[in-house]
Amino acid sequence: DTTEVITRNILEAWGHTLAEDITAPHPVPPFDNSAMDGYAVRAADVAGATPGGPARLRVLEDLPAGYVSGREVGPGEAVRIMTGAPLPPGADAVVPVENTQAEGWEVLVLEPVSSGENVRRAGEDVREGETVLRRGTRIGPAEMGMLASLGRAEVPCHRKAIVGIISTGDELLEPGEELRPGKIRDSNSFSLFGLVLEADAVPLRLGPVRDDPDLLERVILENVEKVDAFVTSGGVSVGDYDVVKEVLQRVGEMEFWKVAMRPGKPQAFGMVGGRPLFGLPGNPVSVMVSFEMFVRPALLKMMGRREIFRPTVTAVLDTPVGRKKGRTELIRVIAEWREGRYHARVTGPQGSGILKSMVLGNALAVLPEEVG
């Protein structure tokens, strides 16, 4: 299900998803205005102007942005105008100030302009009644500016999903703790925290949790009403400490726990209290790749987003890759445009515990399961 629709001030709407189409109540800009500082003129009066034979015009007034001229520009006349100021009646072009020479209340125009030159027409950006933003659009800086220009101080959007993040394992230490024999620092929950933020959702870190099914069950049940989804790491393999699978079977429903992909084969998915739970593997790369493939699109869809998948291109793989058929393989690569097409090269060793392969890469090369 999608998250509920809420109303946000546009200053608080960044990263949310629009819940309705936005149409323009008026044109943008709402009136013809000057595209630069200069002089509003009749193009016919300066048609033959040159530096050696300038057109001499009488200046009627100064017109700053935010004000409307009460004068009509007639033959041989001009208005000194600032960028954004409405074009005065009678004028049909603007001469840039650098192509003029002021002499008191007269101006010498040194270059000709054509009708409409350096003028931004009413509706040039947006026409009245035009659908400018579609439901399901992510609200970013440009969308915030457009909403403001249309007079929308508030906007209906989907609430950001709250995601509970739990890493499991007796071996896990917090980043500030000193390393001890047999222990490693928990990196997965921090990678997941960043991935959830990048998906425009709200991360809630609930771990790490020891390999204790009772403890994990308590953490999940204590937070099930606070979150829209859970993402766990570890505890989904075929070993003796598959705590996530056990808890799913106890208090929820498990839909599946293996996927024909590498990295990321062991992962569980199910529902707890009406909330989806994504049980990801324990290896750092498997966690991030599995999130990209399954969790990110699900969260975006949950928040009403229209486009939920990453851009995909066809590329030449410049690095030889040995692999077996039967599983989709996701290789961490550096992709770049070169010689008229995309090329990709492997980031280095591709083990599922080599987090540096994600740090160095900017794309995933998807090798279909039938390709050897």
Image: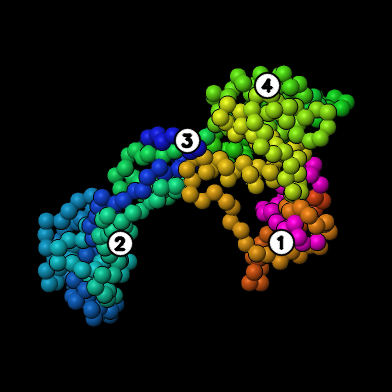
Q: Residue at x 26, y 70 (%)?
A: 116
Tags 2 and 4 in contact by the CB under 8 Å rule? no
Give 292 or 250, whichever is nearer the viewer.
250
Left or right of residue 193: residue 39: left
Q: Mark number for residue 292?
A: none
Mark 3 vs mark 2: in front: 3
Q: Is residue 80 visible?
A: no
- Residue 95 percent coordinates (x, y): 27, 68
Q: CA distance from mark 3 to mark 4?
A: 25 Å
Q: Mark number for residue 3?
A: 3
Q: Residue at x 21, y 61 (%)?
A: 87
Left or right of residue 230: residue 53: left
* Residue occupied by mark 4: 217
In the structure shown, which secondary structural element does the residue marked by tag 1 occupy?
Answer: strand
Q: Mark number for residue 344?
A: 1
Q: Is residue 207 visible?
A: yes
Mark 1 vs mark 4: in front: 4
Q: Tag 2 or tag 1, which sits nearer the N-term?
A: 2
Q: Tag 4 or tag 3, which sits nearer the N-term?
A: 3
Q: CA distance from mark 1 to mark 4?
A: 43 Å
Q: CA distance from mark 2 to mark 4?
A: 59 Å
- Residue 268 percent coordinates (x, y): 70, 37
